[in-house]
Amino acid sequence: LVTSDAAPQLHFAVSGREIMRLGKAEADKGLRSAADQAHLSQTGPALYAPLPLGDEAAMGILLLAAYSGEEWREEDEPVAQAFAKACSIAFQEMHERSQLQQGVEETQQENARLQEESERLQADRMNVETRLEQTEQEWRNERQRAEGLASLVKDQDAAAAAPVALPEG
């Protein structure tokens, strides 16, 4: 993290998304913590190039000539900007791939959930069909029984309505 107290010029460059070169003295004073984080024993001259990431937080590439100690030249700036742009494109593509991968994973999870739901509904439908067949068979059995009873009652009514022959005599 570059603070305005530690490296005011670089902080201004990061905030304003400007390319900036810092000489060895300025870099030594303001970028010691960055060099420490990179496990560098010294800082050396620095060249900062912002990453063009649209409205994202201000970020950039900080190049340190820690070992050569050579000052960055004005001719180095377009190369640093081109490198920063290439990095920015790569970061954006990585971000887009990550979002696409997340979308694929979410779609796969939803597909698995829907498949499970479909299998559950199919099992439920099979159970309903089985119960319906059983109920239809029970209904047919009861209908046959009712028809048999109705026939028996009819036969008994017919027998009861028939004239009874009385014995003579």
Image (cartoon, helix red, strand yellow):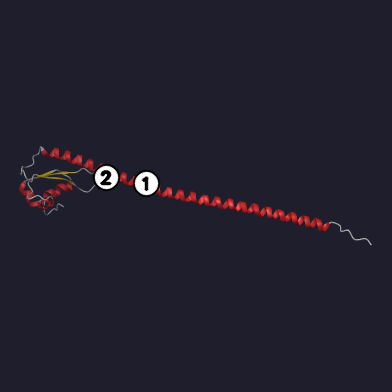
Residue depicted at 52% across the width and 52% down the height: 127
Return the residue at label 2.
95
Indicate the quadrant where residue 89 lies.
Answer: top left
Residues 85 and 93: in front is 93
Q: Which residue is pictured at 26% across the width and 45% down the height?
A: 95
- Where residue 15 appears, as percent x and y from the top left, is 17, 48
Which circle marks residue 2 in the picture? none
Residue at x-position 26% and y-position 41%: 93
Q: Earlier in the sequence, mark 1 or mark 2?
A: 2
Q: CA distance from mark 1 to mark 2?
A: 20 Å
Query: How many residues crowd mark 2 within 10 Å: few (<14), some (14–19), many (20+)?
Result: few
80 vs 5, nearest the viewer: 80
* Circle 1 Cα neighbour tier, 10 Å, few/some/many (<14 / 14–19 / ≥20): few
Classify residue 47 by image quadrant: top left
**What residue is pinned by disc 1?**
108
Please state if 98 lies on the left or on the right of 141 as rendered. Answer: left
Image x and y of residue 77, in percent: 12, 39
| Residue 1 pos. (x, y %) | 16, 52
The three-letter code of the residue at mark 1 reads Gln
Q: Secondary structure at mark 1?
A: helix
Name the quadrant of the C terminus: bottom right
User: Is 143 situated left or right of 97 in this image?
Assistant: right
How many callouts does the rendering have?
A: 2
> Can you say whether 97 is above or below 33 in the image?
above
* Element under disc 2: helix
Three-letter residue code for mark 2: His
**Residue placed at 9% from the left, 52% from the top?**
32
Relative to the observer, which residue lies in front, 108 or 43? 108
**Side of 34 relative to 159 (left or right):** left
